[in-house]
Image (cartoon, rainbow, N blue to C red):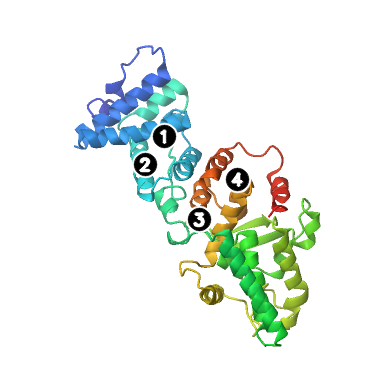
Amino acid sequence: MSDGTREVQGAARLELVSGVHLLHPEDAVLDAMMSGWGRQQIGGRGLQAGTAAGRQRIVEQFRDFTNEYPWNWTAAHIDEWMADLVMQHDRAKSTLRTYQGAVSLFMDYLLDPVYGWVDVCLERFGTHPTPILHDGNRREHLVDYEGEAERRPMTREECQLFFDHIDDRVERAIKRGRKGALTAYRDATLFKTIYGWGLRASEASGLDVVDLYRNAKAPQFGRYGMVHVRKAKGTKGSGPRRRNVASITPWAVESLEDYVVNVRPRYGFPTHPALWLTERGGRLKVGEIEDRFALYREELGLPEELVPHCLRHSYVTHNIEDGVDPKFIQEQVGHLYASTTALYTAVSSDFANTMMLKAIGLAFDNDPGDRALERSGRR
């Protein structure tokens, strides 16, 4: 440890007596860290004592939640804590920012070589604190989650009303021999697919016919047991990611199979790869998906806040309410962090405890995909 740490407010050398054997070294070092951080904030940065104490209380809450010492904290601990704050305690987004801000400042303090805590931890415990907040899980990611705050899940009643309405439009168009029957049929299947597999509009737009696969764990679905999403949303600074989404909603599978076998060929463009075609033989674009949804929403008089992305939120919420493993749903929708899935979810309070227990690892004993398929039969 360099001598330069001796006179710095909050330095480890000032908080710990060198060479003294500690009866409970982990607790003693943690207490020294908290004490040193308080001195650094008040003496070194000129903050009010109340401000420093408030931040320390937040870090202590995080410590109690993880039941780990700071040199053992990981990014997963932050993720689980954020999910708990949302689902168990209904904390506001401003609170999430405050809590993450306090932990971030504490970690910056521990990792700053000026204060010498990394050396102390290496010497005493053979490990040391590491960064646990990054672009993927810090507050900007949690608060700005793929949409505006008002983009809520659609209720089951709204979903049923919406799907019934677009099905009725198909039947009316067919009976009248109207030119728009193909479009109406395509739209009905498209929105059922977005809901049935929890897709983003951009992911649905990018689907090709060849992206439909068999799933050995769901042979009853034939070639529609798995959807391969090639243009999923990537993390900040990266390109699109890929993921496979297992089919767990039988009625959505039936709708998609009927469209592929009996409806899509009627468009007359057999060599075009796109799953969703326009009447002119192009790929249906995201803006067109949004416009079609808005048309049906307005016909029903549903709230303007509802957009296609709300169907994705509904997929998360409704499946978790039905007992599907939240970790499995997290993987299905391509969320890197359980906290993002928690923000997507608007389950009733009766389901909140169940979700969080499973989200932190108390999941089903058998394969989550198998259990999800069992649950889906009860929808």
Residue nearer the viewer, 94 or 298: 298
Q: Residue 233: x percent and y percent?
A: 54, 60
Residue, disc 2: 99
Task: Please state which amino acid type lies under the numbered disc 3.
Answer: Thr
Say whether disc 3 or disc 1 marks the residue closer to the N-terminus.
Answer: 1
Task: Look at 36% across and 41% down and name the residue there.
Answer: 99
Residue, disc 1: 62
Q: Residue 138: x percent and y percent?
A: 42, 47
Q: Quadrant of residue 59?
A: top left
Q: CA distance from mark 4 to mark 2?
A: 24 Å
Task: Please state which amino acid type lies under the numbered disc 1.
Answer: Phe
Position above or below: 158 against 136: below
Say whether disc 4 or disc 1 marks the residue closer to the N-terminus.
Answer: 1
Task: Look at 37% across and 19% down and name the residue there.
Answer: 28
Say whether disc 1 or disc 2 marks the residue closer to the N-terminus.
Answer: 1
Say whether disc 4 or disc 2 marks the residue closer to the N-terminus.
Answer: 2
Residue, disc 3: 235
> Which label is found at residue 164?
none
Q: Residue 187: x percent and y percent?
A: 63, 74
Q: CA distance from mark 1 to mark 2?
A: 9 Å
Task: Please state which amino acid type lies under the numbered disc 2.
Answer: Tyr
Marks 4 and 2 in Cβ contact (< 8 Å):
no
Q: Residues within 10 Å of mark 3 (few under 14, many from 20)?
A: some
Secondary structure of the residue carrying tag 3 is: loop
Residue nearer the viewer, 155 or 275: 155
Task: Look at 78% across and 73% down and name the residue there.
Answer: 261
Q: Nearer the viewer, mark 3 or mark 1?
A: 1
Residue 275 in view of the camera: yes
Residue nearer the viewer, 127 or 192: 192
Secondary structure of the residue carrying tag 1 is: helix
Residue, disc 4: 327
Q: Quadrant of residue 168?
A: bottom right
